[in-house]
Every structure is written in C-alpha cells, then in structure tokens.
Image (tube, rainbow, N blue to C red):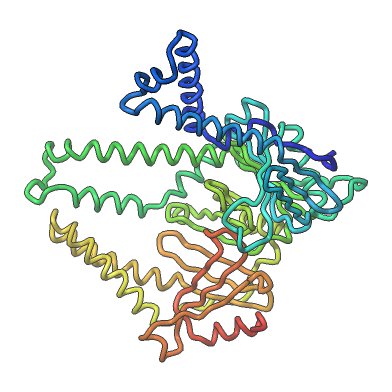
Amino acid sequence: MFSKPTRNHITIILEQIGAFGVVLVTGAFSLLFDIAADLRRGMSFAQILRYSSVGRIPAPVNIVVSLLLVAGVVWLILRWSKTVFYIDSGYLVVERRTLMHRTSRLPLDSISTVNLERNVFEQIVGTAKIKLDINSAATANKTDFTFVLPFEKAKAFEQELTQQSNGQTEEEQPQTRRLVCSFTWVQALRDVLLGQPLVQILIFFVLLVAGIPVDKIALGSSVLYKALPAVALALLSWAAGMIMQFMSAYGFRVEKDDKTFFITSGLLKKKQYVFDKDKVNAVIVRRPLLARAFGYYRAEVAVVGLGNDKHETPQICLLVKKQELERILGECAPDFVCTAKPVRSHKAGLAASLCFYLILSVVVAIVISRIHILLGIAVVLLGIIFAVFSYRNKTVAADDRVFSYSRGLFSIVNGCFKYDGIQTAQFKSNMFFKRMDIGKIRISILSSGSVSLHTTGWFNKLYYDALTDRLGY
C-alpha cells in the first residue's frame, strides 16, 4: 500500500504554523483584501501606502509583513506538495523535491518506536500523526520523522512499519495481542493524586512566607487576605496541571505480542506507542512519597522515542501494588531483575548528604524563623533527618546479567540495566573523597534526555571496577 509515493495530509500545514500562525496569516490575507478593495474604489497605491495603517504600524510595514507571511504559507504548501514518502526494499524513503532536493533512506530495522497520536484538531478533521524514532544517540531527544495521514491510513501505515521493522513479511499473519494491564479512570485519578511531588508544596510555602513583610508576620486576617491571591493562583495552576495529567493517563492500557509492545492512553489527545521489546534499554521503578505511604509503585521503560517530546511517557503501568508490579515486569521485562543483594552507600556519603541538607535547611530556617524561632530549629532537624534517609536510600547491586541502583528522598527511584544496554560508565569523585577511592558511578544509556543519565550515591571504586569488567572496558 505504501510502496508508491504518498503525501502527508494537507492539514499538516496548519499544524506546522500553529494557532498563532493561523491568526497572523488570516490577518495578512485580510489586510491584502482591504488593499485590493481600496484599489477597486479608485485609490492609488501611493495613497494606500500613505493613509492605511494598522494601529501605529506604518502601512508599508504592514504590507511587507503580510507579503512575507503569505509567501511563507505558499512555501509551506509548495514543500507539502513536493514531499513524499514510501517503503522500498526494507527502507523508508522520504523525498523532498524542492529547489534543494533531499532524500532520506531509513532502514526499517533501525526504527525504535512507532507512535500514533491524535489531538483534538486531528480528531475533528479525521487525521492522525505518526511519529518515528530511531536508535540514535544524536536524536534521542527529538522525533526523527513525523507524518500526518487520514486516521485509517495512519493505522495501516503504523501496522506496516511495525511488521517490517520486526522482520515480519506481508504473508505472515499478524500476531495476537495479549492484554498486560489496563486502568480505569478511577485508577488514573489515583495515579495523578498520589504521584504529586510534595517538594512543590514546600517551595511554595517558603516563597509565600518570604514574601510577607517582617513587621506583618501574624495570623491576622489582613495578612491572610493579602496572601489569598497568591495561594489561589498556585492552587489553580496545580489543579490545571493535575487535570492535564489525568487526561494524559486516562484509558491507560498495555498490550503485547511476542515481539512488540502497544501502549495507549489519553482522553483529548489520544496516543499509542509501539516498540520492539528488544529496544528496551532499562527499567525504572519510581515510588513517589504519597504512593509509598499507600504501598504503590510505578514502572517505566527506557526506549528511544518514549519520554522525548513534551508529555510523552515511557510508563508501562500506572501506580500498582508490589505484587501486581512484579507480575507486569515478569511479563514485560523478565530480563531486568537483579538477584544480587543491594549494597548501601559508603559512610562518607552520609557526610556528603549532611553537608548538603544542613546548608539547605539553614537557608530555609532563616526564612521560616521569621514566624517563630522554633520553626527554624524544626527545619534544621528535618534537614538532618532528610540527610539520613537520603543516605540510606542509595544502593547498588550487580549480578551476572544486570546492574541496579536506587536513590532518592521523597521519591525513590530504582533503575535496572542490562550490561549490553549501557553506553558509557564514569567514576566521579571530588577533592575530599578522591584519596579514599570513593566516588559516584554515572552510567548513560540510549534513551531520551530525562532517563539517559543515571548517577548513584557514593561508593568505593571497587564497585565501579567490577562494573567496567563486565562491560569489557
């Protein structure tokens, strides 16, 4: 079906210029139509240049800007008409036959993910967006190719790309998908509510207190009344963010066959991610503070093309109990399980944590003590407690198959990596710990920027040497 040259749907032009561009271009066309009407009424072009203007901008500037905007739209239309794509002998070919002829040939087996999206505009006009990402470190933080097609045609294109990238011929029957997990809207709402970072609340509270004059620090109604607008704005922003997260998590569903994962979610903006299970480079398990209080876990996979554009997510499940998490990981990522016993960070790491949190808590205590000195003392004590917990949560573990680490204070993060998926490993120390052969292990994997770099706590260099031995360095 896609062996012959195919064009994107023409609505891709509107998505390229965006809503602001539509307004500008509409205004430009409106201005040109007004000029044409003036010419029909007998005004000379010199008179139009002299008397016509929009606001305080001279008419010549309006005309030049309008002509440039119209020329830009004409160029986008020309580029759309001259850009085609097709599949040829195991390659996706994208040709742009404009003045500067450009041809890109992408091997189908290098495709990492095939993502299908439908925003509100695309649902109205009946189109869908196909986004392709390849296994490349240079482009790990952006989408490599984007196509806009009618919805049914986009689904067919997605299926053909997925089959051929997995080495499946057209004669072979598509494999049956199996449901891994699905979540109701109540579970999606639970994920949003329990996944909120409490650090934002603490920062907001400190900034709010810092903004109240010293001579008016009291619980009087006048002070609280003046603080209400800031509180209301913060709460509204927070609520809007949670609503957007809920709409993104709505209808979250994971399916798989023997080779491929299919992740779908979204209410207004519907998304589907398709990727080969062999392209998974790591598994990340997160435990936000509120989720930890109720015994919930959230799992992600590190794959190029997931987590790299705006709100794209690499999650393979929303918040679930430990037993359900183990079932999902056992079905989706059985190779990413470390059997070795975790080793806690070196005791020197406790000194580093104490220094960091004491400095931070003292700064906060100076602000909080404006209300009462006991609050300042409480903040410093909390800083010490935070330092201890942060130290205790830093571990590493390694067996013959995978390397694992954990870290965090409010939100605990546990990462697990197969050795062949690690690109680089570094040992970072400082002037104090270098002589003791103590430092942090930093590893990088091929994924989006948000999950491509991982740094452990402070450990003896022996653990780094054992890691590099397994990597063959």
Residue for point 15% across, 59% down: 369
Coordinates of residue 467 in the picture (x, y in percent): 60, 81
Coordinates of residue 439 in the picture (x, y in percent): 45, 81
- In depth, the one of 459 and 290 nearer the eye is 459
> Left or right: where does residue 335 sit relative to residue 220?
right
Residue for point 30% across, 38% down: 233
Seen in the picture, residue 119 relative to 178 is either above or below; the reply is above
> Left or right: where does residue 16 sit relative to residue 331?
left
Coordinates of residue 88 in the picture (x, y in percent): 84, 49
> Left or right: where does residue 253 sit relative to residue 72?
right
Quadrant of the image occupied by residue 443: bottom right
Seen in the picture, residue 161 relative to 428 is either above or below; the reply is above
Question: How many numbered marks have been drawn onto this rendered protein structure?
Answer: 0
Quadrant of the image occupied by residue 409: bottom left
Residue for point 57% across, 86% down: 465
- Residue 274 is at least partly visible in this image: no
Residue for point 56% across, 66% down: 415
Seen in the picture, residue 21 relative to 429 is either above or below; the reply is above
- In depth, the one of 36 and 2 nearer the eye is 36
- Residue 63 is at least partly visible in this image: yes
> Left or right: where does residue 382 sit relative to residue 87?
left
Coordinates of residue 350 in the picture (x, y in percent): 37, 77
As drawn, the residue found furthest toward the bottom would be 435
